[in-house]
Image (tube, rainbow, N blue to C red):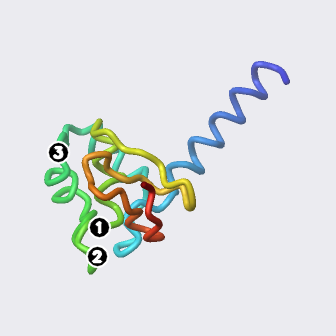
Amino acid sequence: MSASEETEKNRLKSIIDAYRPICLCNKIRKGIVVKAIQSGADTFEKVSRRTGVGTGPCGAARCGPMVRGMLGEEVEICRDCGWSILKATAPPICPRCHSDQS
């Protein structure tokens, strides 16, 4: 694969990744959260105020760990569905598929 093909492949991957849903309740995509963080939102509360993430019916149970992971908190990945789980959470249960990770 040439360098230009590799560059194009990476560009397309980043575009697709930006459309990945983060907040399932409010249909907020990763690209919106990334822009809020790049604009200075450095806590979950600030990201929530700028984007609406975490304000849906689940109360950030599903999106909270993923956004906090993007902010630098330690997360592990659910081995069943690939969703983020905060390492500080005990017991480690996936907020998306409810799989016990212990």
Rendering coords of residue 30 (x, y %): 42, 53
Q: Are marks 2 and 1 in contact (CB under 8 Å)?
A: yes
Toward which corner of the image does residue 28 lie, by quadrant?
bottom left
* Disc number for residue 15: none
Residue placed most toward the observer, 73 or 54: 73
* Disc number for residue 61: 1
Q: Is residue 71 above or below residue 101?
A: above
Q: Mark 3 or mark 1: name the one nearer the start of the chain.
A: 3
Q: Are marks 3 and 2 in contact (CB under 8 Å)?
A: no
* Disc number for residue 58: 2
In the picture of the structure, the residue carrying the numbered disc 3 is 43
Q: Residue at x 71, y 36 (%)?
A: 9
Residue placed most toward the observer, 84 or 22: 84
Residue farthest bottom in this picture:
57
77 sits left or right of 16 in the view? left
Q: Residue at x 34, y 73 (%)?
A: 26
16 sits left or right of 2 in the view? left
Q: Residues within 10 Å of mark 1 (few under 14, many from 20)?
A: some
